Amino acid sequence: MSDTAYLALLLDAPLQSWGFASRFQRRTTGLHPTKSAIIGLVCAAMGLAKGSDEEGAMLPELTKLKMRSIAIPRDVEGPTSPLPVLRLEDYHTVLDTRRASGKMNEDAVVTHRQYLLDARFGVILAGSRFVLERVAAALEDPVWGVWFGRKSCIPAESIHRGLFDTELLAQRRLIRERSIEEFTAVTEVDNFAEGTDSISDQPVSFGDGSSSGPDKRQFAVRRIAMRPGIRQS
């Protein structure tokens, strides 16, 4: 048995939000899951507290995993098949927030937050079998709640779809017998020339647990390649 394995995950929910460039009152979402969000979801399932020694030991092993995400259309009957993915921008009002100076805001703070509607993704994590076996077990029986970017984005069905010996088997579990070329996929690459974009979503630290602000979190740049799928007539 090889030391390398492939873990298939299904991300299906009415709402998803994958932020990677959010600042202050505007919280955007990308069109594909970010690695930082997936690793954060895994850490929650494993019960790793932010800033803990356990997280510090496990996080480097999790970030070594290679990630591929696949946009899986949600097929419906009728002229709108497949169902289009929409991006919704909502706004939230929060009272009694604290400024960086320590003073309380007198007025409500309004934040604009984006969500994906009707999105569905397959994710394949590749790497150490030992690490992925622990991840799979945690997703089967999570210590803490898991969600897709925000607490309001609750999974509609089981995330864990199996641990496999090859990427092809993991891929078939997610998209059945269809060709990967039919789908838009984002793949992590090692060679800069092979990539099509760079994104700062490789988690280095999720903070010390006292704050979730951007000044407490650290991310490295990850090189990715996006391969658009073939549009079916």
Image (tube, rainbow, N blue to C red):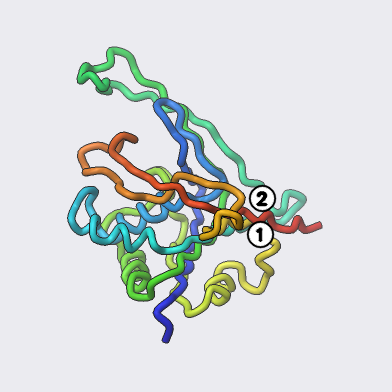
Q: In the orientation shown, which residue stands out farthest toward the left?
A: 53
Residue 166 position (above or below residue 93)? below
Tag on residue 183? 1
* Disc nearest the viewer among 2 and 1: 1
Residue 71 seen from this side? no
Q: In the orientation shown, which residue stands out farthest toward the top?
A: 106
Residue 208: x %, y % from top left: 22, 43
**Nearer the N terminus, badge 2 or badge 1?**
2
Nearer-the-camera pick, 15 or 1? 1
In the image, what residue type sits under mark 1? Phe
Tag on residue 83? 2
Nearer-the-camera pick, 93 or 24? 24
Relative to 45, is 199 on the left or the right? right
Identify the image quadrant of the N terminus. Answer: bottom left
Identify the element where label 1 is drawn.
Answer: loop
Relative to 109, is 51 on the left or the right? left
In the image, what residue type sits under mark 2? Leu
Residue 222: x %, y % from top left: 47, 51
Q: Local crowd at mark 2 within 10 Å, few (<14), some, or many (≥20)? A: some
Q: Local crowd at mark 1 within 10 Å, few (<14), some, or many (≥20)? A: many
Tag on residue 134? none
Residue 41 position (above or below residue 135)? above
Q: In the orientation shown, which residue stands out farthest toward the bottom?
A: 1
Q: Residue at x 66, y 57 (%)?
A: 75
Measured Cα–Cα span from mark 2 to mark 1: 14 Å
Residue 72: x %, y % from top left: 61, 58
